[in-house]
Image (spheres, rainbow, N blue to C red):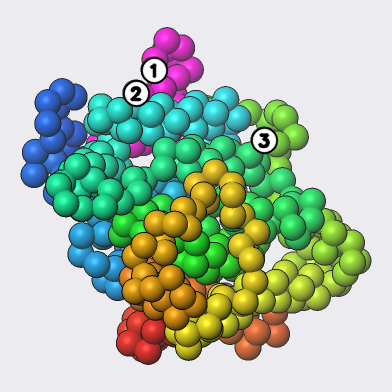
Amino acid sequence: MYILAQTRIRLRPLISRTSVCLARYSDYQAPPTSGALKEEDIHRATQYCTNLLKQYDHPSYILTTFLPPYARPAHLAIRAFNLELARIPDASPSAPVRSMRYQFWRDTITSTFAQKPVAQPVAVLLSSVLSSLHTHRSSPNSNPPPALSKSRFLRLITTREKYSTNAPYSTLASLESYAENTYSTLLYLTLSALPLHSLTADHIASHIGKAAGIVAVLRGIPLLAFPPPPNHHSNTTSPGGTLDTQRVQQGAVTLPLDIMAECNLKEESVFRYGADAPGLKDAVFKVATRASDHLITARQMLRNVQEGGDVGHGFEHEGEEGHEYNVDDSVQQTPSNSSDGKSVQQKMEVEKAFGVFMPAVPTALWLQRLENGDFDIFKEDLRRRDWRLPWKAWVAYRRRMF
């Protein structure tokens, strides 16, 4: 279906971005472009997003059950949106087509937040979620909860597009920044859907998201270094092209350059020797250790709050867009303006947010498998689904500790 859509672009230059991107949803019966969404429209959109997660993001599909029922549609829409963005580079090796598809999603988010969703399942479900949150905010005798942030969705698009060419990260810090602007942002959006706007919950989610983002990059190294052969029957690609296009088609090593330099690891060695490349395991170890450090930090913060203490350190992103916190509002909700009241409030917040923290479980399981395999990133076992996840997730949720 992608090939057909891209072929139409070449034959009919005036075709719209919307037509290009909607060509993929042949099995999805779109709702009318005008009027209120019907229940069957929302049901079909929910089913589409659920199937998308089940096929391409199985851990998120499994973890849906640990969220409150009213927050699950938002979780499905947010994670499906992330998958749609993540799949663009694989389906669009041509830079102009990639750019068109990212712009399509910018336009889609803008129209969805204006309550004019396009006939696309993720947009339909997200529009339904936004309407539900708006209704809750408008209800009498209730504190208006925070709405989903349009700027966070746009930040996801911008970050995904920036790294869509598989260019290596200059430093480990830049990899963490990528994880913050993608995987941590997914958690912030889900927290907003609970709804919950909490310094403590956001702080813990930031560390979990950074760990999950780093692990996602590590998991993708074998596939990006040795991508499948191109489809020579497609007329959407041509020999040569830009450096970014060649990188997408020929493979790339996305480990941070500063870590590769420390370990004397060369990209060419990975292409030539694969798992036996000198310095590869050391580089993977260093990057995986940073992900593990974030999980350890999040786990210790959670334990401190549960024991009535403070998280232990400040939130580096406090004060940034989306991370403005009204201390007075939090104090009013506590039993007293004392440290005990603050501790009780923090406990209530992390209890409400714990379902959102659950991606820490599959992240920790994968890091453990990587360690058991002596940090051989090419081990086939690392790309298989972990059959232990449902059980481990249930235990973690029951104990309120990942």
Residue 297 image-quadrant placement: bottom right
Instruction: Name the one closer to the observer, 20 or 338.
Output: 338
Q: Secondary structure at mark 2?
A: helix
Which residue corresponds to the image point at 65% horizontal and 84% vertical from the top-left? 371
Amino acid on which the number 2 mark rests in the picture: Ser
- Tag 3, which secondary structure? helix
Determine the residue located farthest toward the left in the rendered image.
Answer: 39
Type of secondary structure dominating the magenta stretch: helix
Give the mark, 2 or 3, whose residue is nearer the N terminus. 2
Instruction: Determine whether, in the image, residue 42 is placed left or right of residue 335.
Output: left
Q: Nearer the viewer, residue 44 or 154?
A: 154
Percent position (x, y) of residue 19? 34, 23
Boundaries of the magenta span: 1-26
Q: Is residue 107 above or below residue 127?
A: above
The mark nearer the N terminus, 1 or 3, is 1
At label 3, which amino acid type do we have?
Thr
Quickly name the residue at label 1: 16
Q: Which mark is residue 245?
A: 3
Question: How far apart are the two marked residues, 1 and 3, measured between alpha carbons?
Answer: 23 Å
Q: Residue at x 49, y 53 (%)?
A: 325
Answer above or below: position of 104 versus 385: above
x, y (%) of residue 338?
46, 75
**What is the spatial separation of the Cα atoms under label 2 and label 3, in whole angstroms?**
24 Å
**What residue would you read off at disc 2?**
19
Helix, strand or loop under label 1: loop
Q: Are marks 1 and 2 in contact (CB under 8 Å)?
A: yes
